[in-house]
Structure formats: C-alpha cells, structure tokens
Amino acid sequence: MDMKFERLSDVARRLTLVLALAAVPAIAVPTVARAGDTEPAELVLTAPDRYEPVQDVLYASGDTGYLHRLETNDGSTAPYQWRGYDGSERTVEDFTGRLPGQQGYYGTGTDILPVSVGSSGVVRLRDPATGESTPLTVPDGQHTVGSFGRTVLTVSYNEVWQVDKLHILRLEDGVTTDTPVEPPSGMRFDPYPVAAGDGRVAVVKFTHTYALGVLDLTSGDLTSVTTHAVGPDEPWTLQAAVSPTHIAWYQQGMRQAFVVRRDDPDGAQTSVAMSPSDAGDQVIGLAGDWLLTAFRPATSHEHNPPLTRGGPLKATPLGGGSPVTLLAAAQSDLTQIPGGGAITVGGADAGDWAVRRVEVAADGGLTLRTLSKVPARPAAVRGIALAAGQLVTREIDSAPLPSYHTRTVTLTGTPSAGERTEVATAPLEDSYGQPLGAGDGSVVYARHDDAAQRDVLVRATASGQRTEVIAYDRPTPAASGRGLYDASGRYALYNGGLLVDFEAPGGGAVVEQLDTWAALWGSELWAGGTGGRIEARDLASGAVTSYHVDASCEIRQIQTVGRWVYWDCLGRDVTYDSSAPFGVYDLRTGQNISLPERGKLGDGFVVNQDTGAGRLLLTDFHTGTAAAPRVLTDLPTESWWKNYDVDKYGGGIAWLDADGAAHVVPSGVPAQALTATASRIDTAYAPRPGTTWNPTWQLSKPSTGAQLVIKSKKKAVRTLTPTADGATLTARWDGTLANGKPAAAGTYTWELTATPEDGAGAPLTLTGTLAVTAGP
C-alpha cells in the first residue's frame, strides 16, 4: 500500500479553554556539573519543592519546649514529640492528645503532659523532657476535659447528662484534691468547656455564647465576661487566648476581637479590628501588647485546592493601629508560651517553612526566632521533554495545580540551566498530558475533555499563547493519551498520522490525516509506504521527494533528524513481531544503517530503554556503522509517564530519576551543521503605524549571536537582533532605518547570520529580498 495524504474535508471543531495560572514564585534550582574522563558532562536539576509545605502541627507550648507532630513521608501516623528550646527532641510515648473518649485541651501552656493509664481512671502527669511522671486519680463519675501543668480539669453530669460542675483536680502529698466549680446562676457549662488556659487560669465556655468564664485554677474563683457575640449561639465558634498580661476572645464571623487585662477580667474591654480575609477562619493569639491572627483554611472539596497552607500571620497593636504581617503564610497553629509570646509554623513558602517563636522586643515590637526548620519535600515530577535545549517537566504538586515548567539548558562547556518558569496547567492523570517540545519554545500536550468526550491537543507557546484543537469530531473515550507522537514548530502529529496545524488560517485545526505513522522535520512531513518506500512532503510548497530503504516491507513507523531517517516495519497497531526490519537511512549517502535495538532517534544516535535490565542505552551510528550500546544510566521503565527524552533539535538526552531530579547530558556524538528547516518570511512590507515585518526561521538546533542586517544597494541601513525561542529565530522591523527615519519604498535585501550554540559546524548565513511598497 502506498503512502496517502488525505485532506480532511471537514476541519475539526476547536475548543477554547482559559487556563488559570496560580501566581507562585519561581524556585531556584541548583545545578551540578559532573564530568568524567570519557563521559560527557552531566547537568543534574533536583526536583523542586512541593508547593504545599510539610505540616508540623503544634499542640502545646511550655517554658522549656513544645509538643508537635511532623508530617511523615509515607502518610503514616506521626508520633508526638517534645522539642526543647535547646534543640533536644524526645518522643512522647502513649500520649494521644486527649484522654480516651474525650476532647479538650491537654498540656496547654505548661511543660507537663497527661498520659492515661488504660481505663483505670489514673492519669500520669509526665514531664516530656525527662520522662518522669506522677499519677493522679480521676474520681468516678468525672470526665477529663483539660489539663494545665499538674492540674486536671474534669466535668460531672446530672441525671439528664448535662454538665453540672467543673472540678479542679490536683495532687497534694500524693492525694488527689477536688475543687468543684459551679456555673453562674442560670447558666450551664458547655460539654467541652475549655477555650484556653495555662497553669494558673482557664477560659471556659457556657452553653450560650454571650459569656465566657475566667477560672482561677488555684482558688476556683470563676469570673463571667461578656463576649459581645453577635453570631449564631454556637459555643464551638468561640475561641480565646491567654498571655501573662491579657485574655482575648473572638467568635467566628465577628469584625473584632475583645481583650481584657488578665488581672482585671471583668474590667474594661478593648476591641481590636479583625481584617477580613478569604483565607479561612481566623485564629487568635497574644504576644505582649499585640493580638496575633492566623487563618484556619476553609474546607475545600477540590482535589488539589489552590491554597492549602492558610493565610498570613499578622499582629495588630492592642492600643490601636494597623496590623503588620509577621509571616507571608502560616499554619493555623498558635500556641501560647506561659512566660510570654507564642509559637507558630510558617514562612514565605515551603522552602522557608519553620517553627518560629514570636517574642516581644525591647522596644515593645515583635520579633521572630526560628526554633526548627521544617524541610520541604520534593514535588512529584511525572513527565519530561527536551527540545532545542528547552527542558520541560510535568510537575504534579510544585504549584497549586499540576503544571508544566520549562527552563533553558546549555550543555556546551560547563552545563547550566536558566530560570524555571511555569507555562501552563497540566492534566491531573498521568496517562494524559505527557509533554512534547516543538523546538520553538512551545509545549504540546494532550488532554481529555470528559464533558465533551473528546481528546484535545494543546499548544502553549513561550509568549503565553495557548491554542486548543479537538483531535476528532466524534466522541472518544478517555484512553492512554499517549498518542502525541511528534511536534515541529506550528505542527504536531497525534495517533500517528493526524496532522495538526496550530496556526492554520482561522485558528488551529486538524489539516491532514494519513493512514500510517508519520514524522515532522521543520516544514517537512515524512511518512512510509510499501516496499521500503519513504516520502517527504514540503508542507509549504507541496513538493514530494521519495526514497527507498533496504527493506521490502511496509514502513509503519518513522522518525527523522536532518540527514537521518529512522524507519521501522513494526507498527504500533499490529501484532508485535520483533523480527520486523528496522534501521536508519542516511539521506546524504543513501546508506542504510543496521541498529542492534529499536529506539528514539537523535542526531547520529538512538536511545533505547532496556526494560529487562532497567537501563537507558545510547547507540552511536554517525560513522555509518552502529557502535556497541553505551549505558547512560540505570532507569526502570514507567508505565504511565515518560521518564526520558531525546532532543532531536540539539543532541541532548534527559531523564528523570526516582527522586524526581532531571538529568541532562550531551550525546557525545558529532552534530550536523546548523541549517534552516522552515521559515515564514513575507516578501513585501508596507510600513504602517503599529505594524512590523516579522520574519521567522526555524533552525535545526539552537544558535547564538544571531543578527539580521537589512541592506539597501549593499549598504547596511538597519541591524536587528532576532529573538531566540529554542531553535527558532524571530525578528521585528518597524520600517525605520538606523537613523530613525522611515525606509523609502524600494527593494531591500536582508542577511541573517547565526552561530551554532554547540560550536559544531560553520555559522549559518541566509539571504533574501524584501519589497517595501510604501512609506508610512
């Protein structure tokens, strides 16, 4: 069967989708160059930090340390740990955060933690720094609701299971003493009454939100305080904070918090404005003469919510004034230190996350002191592409949503990498969204629109433009999404022979459908036929050139890089037969080169993944004879995502290791000379305000030092520096000369010169003419 180019009579419908990008700062990525005596230098780019910081949950703060639990790597339950301010760390065995069957505040504002002894009613008051503990027996009929140092607070119930009393339990000479506390007349304690406290006082809640109680844990005296609550009568929405000098409270939804002097709880109240925020419910704390506010993120039903780390940590002066931001982002954990100040967890981003102590400075202001860094964890990187020196990584959780990030890598001399930039959001599923570089700085990928039941091809350019094309005008169930086969500039191939032109007149569209797998090189579309026939068609002119390789079978797969054409008679849609012929055809010599293994074509080499041994191998054939395969790295095969790629526009090889680090190495194989593979150059230009002449050249590999000289009668009248995106050069001329005057109507010549970035081959020189038809 001969190769057929069939023009689609009905252009596929186009779908427009606005992709919202989260504004996250670029993360600096360290690079490591490694060179051996025989191996090319290697560039190693560690995986970026996971966007969501590692959670280090705070439970209590004392004068000597704090209780916390650090999120584990594997999602298992983290142990409770006591970290001293001196840096010591000790696991607190048997501590559960609350006593069995109860909720409450345990260990708040002290250095003593309660540990229950089974169901015996005995509570051991343990010093977490030393492990020493003292037993305290809870009387029958009482239930614990909080502990503050060596004081345990319990409740007892009446015959209808309403809380009738609080009980202050403490040890005196080894005997548990019980100080009962009655509620004010006409009021009842909330079943979970503790709102805040330390070793000397506890703030307790009632069944109605219009009042709070300040309980002296030594005397048992209870002072009622009016809350000014205006929201629903829901005690669980009330929160409080206690410092050595003040007591503060706040109800969710209120526009202000209230503060009283600790030594005069029923005295004058100070109101402090609460800044409205959509970051979630506000959480309060105290430090000196400042009210602290953090945010408890609102519950989100999104798979990957846009902000899971909460909002900023702010401080507002109690005497009036605007709030100041202490931390750009913080967890909602705010634990009070009984001697003054508070502890929180936060920072600028995941790489800056730490447990920090808020302290009062000598001038009355606040300072932050880092107690312990919370190391960031690497993001999951699930896909890689390399084209014209542009490295693309598909990252699942380095940003609020899965996304593609690009950076320019240079392998000449000492390997280096440019700034990492987010270019587009990515499909969540690994089976879709594997990236492909087109050699011009753009990223191409496929996604499935579940609502429309269509595969959608997406192109995101370096300038931020996005174009979407529906692959088929019929419903298609979600499949592997791995059919994106090749890309070159404005074109891409999907499922073998579906040719997409992202810059077709009227918008991106499917413009060709072949009955075989095809390949792209610049503006040439390559495909195979029967009897070892391969053909190249120039998409601009329509000219077709035929070749024959040393095989009598039907060519079913093809790849091309300049002079090299990789062909294979093994199709992706036929029964696997490893004996089917394959090889590389040299367009320059007409020679057919045998290969030991199938692989991905580069400039004078192929790379293949040995699935059995879990290795990535390179076979050099540029001399006309395939050398023995060379091991690049150990690399197991991934079923659902692409973990290596070959830069056919530059000669590099990239892969992802098990930790998500990207490795890029030059092939070490001599490269072809720099050539132009496609161009779009208007031959006439009528200068008008706001218009420019915009020639574009797609080259075979990246270049440097490009200049475009415009001449009139062999005299240079304007010199321009084209913009490089990957291996593509674009110039802009507004029709003015070097002296700023407009160019006169007439015929001009242009000359483009560029030097190969890799230093291989001679500089490129291209020339042409331009008719300037009228002045501005």
Image: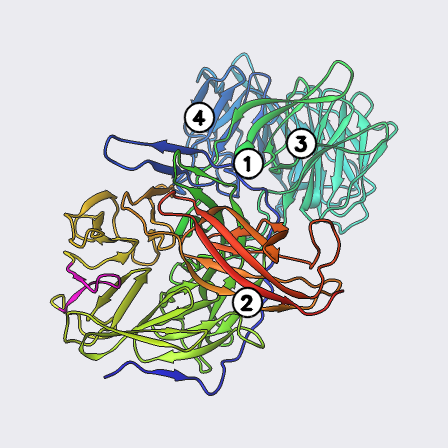
Q: CA distance from mark 1 to mark 3?
A: 24 Å
Q: Are marks 4 and 3 in contact (CB under 8 Å)?
A: no
- Residue range in magenta is 580-594
Give coordinates of residue 492: x percent, y percent. 43, 68
* Quarter in which the C terminus is drawn: bottom right
Residue that label 3 marks:
196
The answer to which quarter of the image holds residue 130 is top left
What residue do we see at 21% from left, 79% from top? 530
* Number of disc labels: 4
Q: CA distance from mark 2 to mark 4?
A: 56 Å
Residue to which mark 4 is pinned: 92
Q: Which residue is mark 2?
A: 467
641 sits left or right of 296 in the view = left
Q: In the rendered image, which quarter contains the N terminus?
A: bottom left
Q: CA distance from mark 1 to mark 4?
A: 28 Å
Three-letter amino acid code at disc 3? Answer: Ala
